[in-house]
Image (spheres, helix red, strand yellow):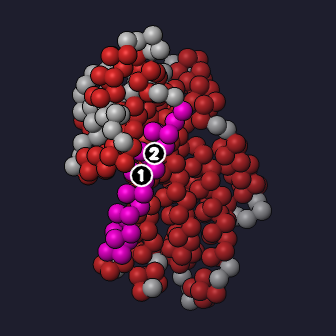
């Protein structure tokens, strides 16, 4: 187990450098002069040159890249254009809000989808099975930018049960979490059902039943434990995707997280801040995939010995 984790950590750092490289060049290869976008075309040439020097844009691209990589490993992502605050500190202020929303969305999706998928597999071709698959199909089809306002209209405006926007107590988390976790819940329900159907047909499940084990024990200890690998894969991949989906959800609900900060950075043409936000989102995706790989080894001992 330890050797497996060490190998994954060794592969983790080249991926991180690759992500940082992609973020840097994608931001710098966007058409248009960022200095003109910030100051306007009618700004004085001296002002443009001073800002370009302050941002380090007067240096060759390779030197800018080297400075970005070396400073990033020191935790220095530069300063924002407008407030002149460190980008790292601004992002760290918003990161807990995004993490809170993502964790709640994953939790809501898991506690709904896994029991639903297990029951759908156990009662295959029943009315419950067909109904749950129809609901999951709707969940996959409904986009966040439509579901969010719909929930606001119904639960906040019409019924007055939940707040419209902002971050506060548990009530403020319910609508954004449901909006963000609905698609994950729908995908996870279908994957759980499919994986459980495969496991329930295996000989070890038949053997466990022949030994007289209770049906709950057969499903929980034998079928579900072996069905967890594809389920973990979906949770891991979609958890990273939640961060990109959070950009829309946080904007709809005025949630003060990294997603909303990214939109603000785009609107204000704050390129250092935008670069930092995109980098954090990408690195979060990589970290989630590393955790997923480690969980593989925990649930499937065969992976440890490969």
- Return the mark for residue 25: 2
Pick the residue in front: 26 or 195. Answer: 26
Q: Residue at x 62, y 76 (%)?
A: 199
Quadrant of the rendering where the N terminus is positioned: bottom left
**With 35 as the anchor, is 51 left or right in this view?**
left
- Magenta region, main secondary structure: helix
Q: Is residue 47 above or below residue 133?
A: above
Relative image position of residue 276 (x, y in whole percent): 36, 39
**Residues under labels 1 and 2: Cα distance?**
6 Å
Q: Residue at x 52, y 57 (%)?
A: 237
Q: Residues within 10 Å of mark 2 (few under 14, many from 20)?
A: few
Relative image position of residue 303 (x, y in whole percent): 46, 80
Element type at marker 1?
Answer: helix
Element type at marker 2?
Answer: helix
Q: Which corner quadrant of the image does residue 57 belong to?
A: top left
Q: Residue at x 54, y 82 (%)?
A: 213
Query: Marks 2 and 1: in contact by CB < 8 Å?
Result: yes
Is 89 a magenta residue?
A: no
Q: Which corner quadrant of the image does residue 297 belong to?
A: bottom left
Q: Which residue is mark 1?
A: 21
Range shown magenta: 6-31
Relative image position of residue 294 (x, y in whole percent): 39, 69
Pick the residue in front: 53 or 92. Answer: 53
Q: Residue at x 63, y 69 (%)?
A: 195
User: Which residue appears farthest toward the left when viewing the image?
Assistant: 74
Does residue 251 appear in the picture of this structure?
yes
- Return the mark for residue 177: none
């Amino acid at each position: 187990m330890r050797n497996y984790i060490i190998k994954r950590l060794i592969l983790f750092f080249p991926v991180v450098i690759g992500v940082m490289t992609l973020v840097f060049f994608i931001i710098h290869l966007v058409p248009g002069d960022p200095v003109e976008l910030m100051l306007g075309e009618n700004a004085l040439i001296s002002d443009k040159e001073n800002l370009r020097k302050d941002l380090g844009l007067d240096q060759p691209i390779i030197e800018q890249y080297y400075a970005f990589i070396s400073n990033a490993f020191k935790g220095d992502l530069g300063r924002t254009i407008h407030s002149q605050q460190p980008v790292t500190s601004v992002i760290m202020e918003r990161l807990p809000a995004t993490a809170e929303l993502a964790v709640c969305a994953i939790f809501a999706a898991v506690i709904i989808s896994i029991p639903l998928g297990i029951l759908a597999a156990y009662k295959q071709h029943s009315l419950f099975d067909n109904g749950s698959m129809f609901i999951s199909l709707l969940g996959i089809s409904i986009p966040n930018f439509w579901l969010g306002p719909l929930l606001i209209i119904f639960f906040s405006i019409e019924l007055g049960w939940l707040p419209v926007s902002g971050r506060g107590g548990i009530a403020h988390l319910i609508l954004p979490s449901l909006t963000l976790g609905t698609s994950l819940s729908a995908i996870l329900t279908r994957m759980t059902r499919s994986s459980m159907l495969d496991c329930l047909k295996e000989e070890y499940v038949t053997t466990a039943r022949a030994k007289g084990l209770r049906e709950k024990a057969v499903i929980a200890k034998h079928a579900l434990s072996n069905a967890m690998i594809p389920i973990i894969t979906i949770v891991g991949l979609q958890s990273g995707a939640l961060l990109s989906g959070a950009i829309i959800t946080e904007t709809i609900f005025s949630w003060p997280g990294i997603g909303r900060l990214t939109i603000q950075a785009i609107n204000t043409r704050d390129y250092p801040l935008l670069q930092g936000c995109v980098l954090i989102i990408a690195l979060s995706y990589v970290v989630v995939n590393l955790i997923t790989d480690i969980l593989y080894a925990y649930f499937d001992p065969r992976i440890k010995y490969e």
